[in-house]
């Protein structure tokens, strides 16, 4: 099951699990669509993997399997 991290690892923008706009790699590194578009160009800076749109989780699925609350932020120098 996806961890559904709550924010972008670059800019710390909130990325709610029930809304589109998050990009993830196969290790679930998570970035917002804007950072992906402006800086990353579909390549994860952590592992070099491809970034893809993260599916959303809502309703009962989100209620029974809540998103992570642990924020991971790696501000670039």
Image (tube, rainbow, N blue to C red):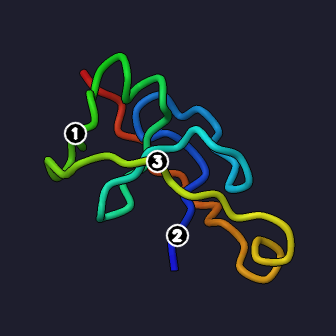
| Residue 31 percent across, percent down from the top left | 44, 40
Callout 3: SS: strand
**Residue 16 as seen in the image, left or right of residue 38:** right
Mark whose residue sits in front, 2 or 3: 3
Q: Few, some or many C-alpha atoms within 10 Å of disc 3 (few <14, some 14-19, many ≥20)?
A: some
Callout 2: SS: loop
Q: CA distance from mark 3 to mark 1?
A: 12 Å
Callout 1: SS: loop
Kindly identify which residue carries mark 2: 3
Mark whose residue sits in front, 2 or 1: 1
Kindly identify which residue carries mark 1: 43
Q: CA distance from mark 2 to mark 1?
A: 20 Å
Q: Which mark is residue 68?
A: none
The residue positioned 26% from the left and 28% from the top of the image is 41
Q: Few, some or many C-alpha atoms within 10 Å of disc 1 (few <14, some 14-19, many ≥20)?
A: some
Figure check: 65 above or below 6 = below
| Residue 55 percent across, percent down from the top left | 56, 58
First of labels 3, 1 by sequence position: 1
| Residue 42 percent across, percent down from the top left | 28, 36
**Residue 69 as seen in the image, left or right of residue 42:** right
Kindly identify which residue carries mark 3: 53
Q: Nearer the viewer, residue 23 or 71?
A: 23
């Amino acid at each position: 099951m996806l961890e559904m991290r709550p924010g972008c690892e670059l800019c710390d923008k909130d990325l709610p699990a029930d809304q589109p706009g998050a990009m993830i790699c196969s290790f679930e590194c998570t970035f917002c669509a804007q950072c992906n578009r402006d800086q990353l160009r579909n390549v994860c800076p952590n592992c070099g993997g491809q970034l893809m749109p993260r599916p959303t989780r809502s309703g009962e699925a989100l209620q029974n399997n809540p998103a992570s609350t642990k924020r991971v932020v790696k501000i670039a120098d």
